[in-house]
């Protein structure tokens, strides 16, 4: 574990460095408070620090105060080390944000014991951060497939639609549904059904770029969002995604299964001022059209009427019926 | 009062206590002595001129540094003398500074031969 030693006096610094190195720490030592603050603010910087009280540039309590004002970073356990020893000074040191206080000349055993306390606190903090991250992940991801859940993917889609309008780009929405999924569940059971869902999720994720989104929209429904997609390639991209499912068998506990997916596809740039709900509704209708057309295919949602009758950009593909 | 201060029970240099603090690491001890031999004379010279100029701020800073250095080395008596000087400078007792500095120098005069003797001994 990394530890910072800040002391302007060379002899005490050397003593600390050696004592701490012997205790197994990776020691970073500096000569003043300013350097101490720089080291502690580095990414992956030390999270344990021994600070001398009186130092040039910034003194120990000033470093403590500066560290405590940045709340967004992970906790740094701060120990003030000094030959000061009065009660008032102890209080002053702790109130500046130090966690502990040691008087020089320090006893090596006591120092190590106090640092172990610091490590316990840091471990506790790590666990809390991890727990919070797990909760955040669970709140935004589907438990079975680990894809974004419906709420999270819709949030991202909303943001992306705003952005694509602002930047005059196209967001492509794909709403996909596994064909005859109920038969899989009824014939092979839910375990195999789950295997199919997980493999479908993995294939959809592999079929898109790292900055596209894939979410589980409902039971066997998936929402894929292609960000800043060239409209000329939207159909090709969507076909590739469809074929990533139908192209090869899915291995399950009950043997390989051939499955297909139907997709409704929508290009945001063709539907300028619609709300996200309206766009999803149109995509859903296109998905039903695809289902009605025999499944394992995709349909692109097209506005039924052109927004400006005089414009030359009349959609030349009439709406395909189911 | 002066008498009781001069009859301090602490040793000039508590090498046993220092060795315990450094886990009997002779090499580290030698390192510390070398740092001391280099830093102490320089710091005390700066302190002398700060006292001569009645520069209280630097006087406090330098005597504090010496207090830490001497304390870390286990030079208990000299550390106490530096602490006294630190205290006087912080409470702006300019009149007593010179006397306190002399006391510190006397302690240093006792201490340095002990350190040299130890270094000569371990070198053999």
Image (tube, coloured by chain):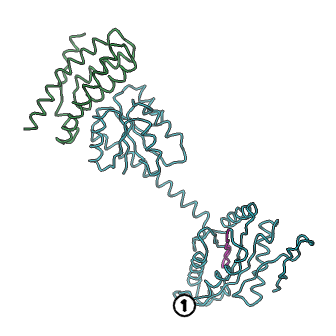
* Element assignment for label 1: strand
Q: Residues within 10 Å of mark 1 (few under 14, many from 20)?
A: few
Colour of the chain lettered B? green
Q: Residue at x 30, y 50 (%)?
A: A24
Give residue A172's quadrant in the image.
bottom right
- Say whether residue A277 is left or right of residue A183: right
Circle 1 is placed at which residue position? A256
Q: Position of residue B81 (x, y in %)?
A: 26, 19
In the displayed orientation, state which residue is furthest to the right. Answer: A310
Indicate yes or no whether the magenta region holds residue A171: no
Taking the view exactly as shown, the residue that stands out farthest to the front is A312
Chain of residue at mark 1: A
**Residue closest to the eye, A310 or A69:** A310
Q: From which residue to which does the magenta span run? A: A217-227
Residue at image coords 30%, 35%: A10
Q: Is residue A30 above or below residue A1?
A: above
Q: Position of residue A78 (x, y in %)?
A: 42, 40
Q: Position of residue A123 (x, y in %)?
A: 42, 52
On whether residue A219 falls in the magenta region, the answer is: yes
- Residue A301 image-quadrant placement: bottom right
| Residue beneath the point at 31% across and 44% down | A112
Direction from residue B60 to residue B122 in the image, left or right: left
Q: From this viewpoint, which residue is outermost toward the top?
A: B95
Vertical relation: A208 (above or below) A1: below
Q: Quadrant of residue A30?
A: top left
Q: Is residue B79 above or below residue A52?
A: above
Query: What residue do we see at 37% from left, 24% from top?
Result: B61
The image position of residue A141, as x and y in percent, is 60, 67
Q: Colour of chain A?
A: cyan
Rendered-image quadrant of the C terminus of chain A? bottom right
Nearer-the-camera pick, A261 or A95: A261
């Amino acid at each position: 574990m990394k530890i910072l030693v800040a002391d302007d006096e060379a002899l005490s610094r050397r003593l600390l460095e050696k004592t701490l190195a012997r205790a197994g720490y990776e020691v970073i030592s500096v000569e003043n408070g300013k350097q101490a603050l720089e080291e502690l603010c580095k990414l992956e910087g030390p999270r344990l620090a021994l600070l001398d009280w009186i130092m040039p540039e910034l003194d120990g309590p000033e470093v403590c105060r500066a560290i405590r004002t940045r709340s967004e970073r992970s906790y740094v356990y701060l120990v003030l080390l000094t030959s000061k020893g009065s009660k008032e000074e102890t209080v002053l040191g702790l109130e500046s944000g130090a966690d502990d206080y040691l008087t020089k000349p320090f006893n090596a055993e006591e120092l190590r014991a106090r640092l172990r306390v610091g490590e316990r606190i840091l471990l506790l903090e790590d666990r809390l951060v991890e727990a919070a991250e797990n909760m955040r992940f669970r709140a935004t991801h589907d438990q079975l497939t680990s894809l974004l859940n419906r709420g999270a993917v819709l949030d991202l889609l909303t943001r992306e639609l705003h952005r694509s309008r602002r930047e005059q780009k196209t967001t492509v929405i794909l709403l996909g549904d596994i064909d005859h999924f109920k038969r899989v569940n009824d014939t092979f059971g839910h375990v195999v059904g789950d295997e199919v869902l997980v493999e479908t999720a993995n294939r959809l994720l592999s079929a898109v770029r790292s900055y596209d989104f894939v979410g589980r929209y409902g039971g066997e429904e998936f929402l894929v969002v292609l960000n800043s997609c060239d409209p000329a390639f939207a159909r090709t991209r969507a076909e590739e995604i469809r074929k990533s499912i139908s192209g090869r068998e899915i291995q399950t506990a009950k043997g390989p299964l051939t499955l297909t997916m139907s997709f409704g596809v929508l290009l945001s740039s063709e539907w300028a001022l619609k709300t996200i709900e309206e766009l999803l509704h149109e995509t859903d209708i296109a998905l039903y059209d695809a289902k009605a057309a025999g499944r394992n295919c995709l349909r692109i949602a097209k506005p039924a009427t052109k927004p400006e009758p005089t414009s030359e950009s009349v959609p030349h593909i009439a709406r395909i019926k189911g | 009062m002066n008498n009781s201060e001069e009859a301090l029970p602490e040793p000039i240099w508590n090498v046993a206590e220092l060795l315990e603090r450094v886990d009997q690491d002779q090499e580290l001890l030698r390192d510390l002595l070398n740092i001391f031999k280099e830093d102490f004379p320089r710091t005390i010279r700066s302190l002398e001129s700060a006292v001569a100029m009645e520069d209280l701020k630097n006087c406090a800073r330098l005597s504090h540094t010496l207090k830490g250095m001497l304390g870390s080395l286990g030079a208990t008596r000299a550390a106490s003398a530096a602490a006294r000087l630190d205290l006087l400078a912080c409470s702006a007792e300019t009149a007593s500074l010179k006397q306190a500095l002399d006391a510190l120098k006397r302690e240093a005069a006792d201490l340095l031969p002990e350190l040299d003797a130890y270094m000569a001994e371990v070198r053999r």
